[in-house]
């Protein structure tokens, strides 16, 4: 990723305050959450700090269940729901400065009483998309 963190600037699990490796474990038991990209986790940790509400990771370093070539399979993506009364526009103010290059907006995702989730990843070429009520996607960057 352009401007991504490498080498000694890469966070370590001991630097991460709000997430544990198992939060990112593969739902199918193949990939281990501890091996997920720590630049991704560090950005989520910063987001969690700024937004000051719990963030539920509904998918992390998965091995299947996502689109073909998904960044979840590379340990470079997380799906989240923020446990807040803020609407998605207010959440966006935090999401947009957290440094993710791929952002998917999923208004229908639900966790307990909370609705509206985001897919966040660290892809090389930025993209922003939204899932529409009919399940189709709208991509905002050409
Ligand atoms: Zn995702």
Image (cartoon, rainbow, N blue to C red):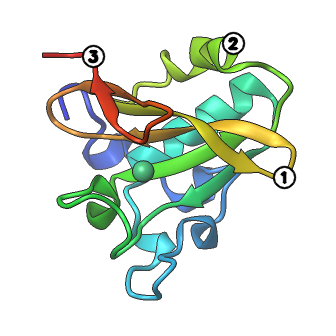
> Residue 90, labelled with which disc?
2
What residue is at 30 percent from the left and 40 percent from the top? 122
How far apart are the two marked residues, 3 and 1, measured between alpha carbons? 29 Å
* Mark nearer the viewer, 2 or 3: 3
Q: Position of residue 29 (x, y in %)?
A: 47, 88
* N-term mark: 3 or 1: 1
Q: Residue furthest bottom?
A: 29
Q: In which quadrant is the C terminus drawn?
A: top left
Q: Is residue 69 visible?
A: yes
Are the residues tagged 2 and 3 within 8 Å (C-beta)?
A: no
* N-term mark: 2 or 3: 2
Q: Is residue 38 above or below residue 45?
A: below
What residue is at 26 percent from the left and 43 percent from the top? 6
Q: Nearer the viewer, residue 46 or 71?
A: 71
**Mark 1 crowdedness (10 Å alpha carbons): few <14, some 14-19, many ≥20:** few
Q: Position of residue 105 (x, y in %)?
A: 48, 30
SS for dot 1: loop
Q: Nearer the viewer, residue 42 or 76?
A: 76
Q: Which residue is mark 1?
A: 112
Q: Which residue is mark 3?
A: 140
């Amino acid at each position: 990723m352009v401007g991504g963190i490498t080498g000694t600037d890469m966070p370590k699990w001991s630097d991460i305050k709000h997430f544990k490796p198992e939060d990112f474990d593969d739902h199918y038991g193949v990939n281990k959450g501890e091996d997920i990209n720590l630049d991704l986790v560090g950005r989520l940790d910063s987001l969690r700090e700024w937004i000051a509400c719990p963030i539920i990771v509904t998918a992390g370093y998965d091995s299947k269940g996502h689109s073909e070539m998904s960044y979840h399979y590379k340990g470079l993506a997380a799906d989240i729901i923020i446990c807040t009364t803020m609407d998605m526009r207010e959440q966006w103010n935090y999401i947009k400065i957290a440094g993710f290059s791929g952002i998917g907006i999923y208004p229908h995702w639900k966790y307990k009483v909370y609705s509206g989730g985001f897919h966040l990843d660290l892809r090389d070429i930025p993209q922003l998309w939204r899932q529409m009520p009919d399940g189709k996607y709208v991509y905002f960057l050409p």
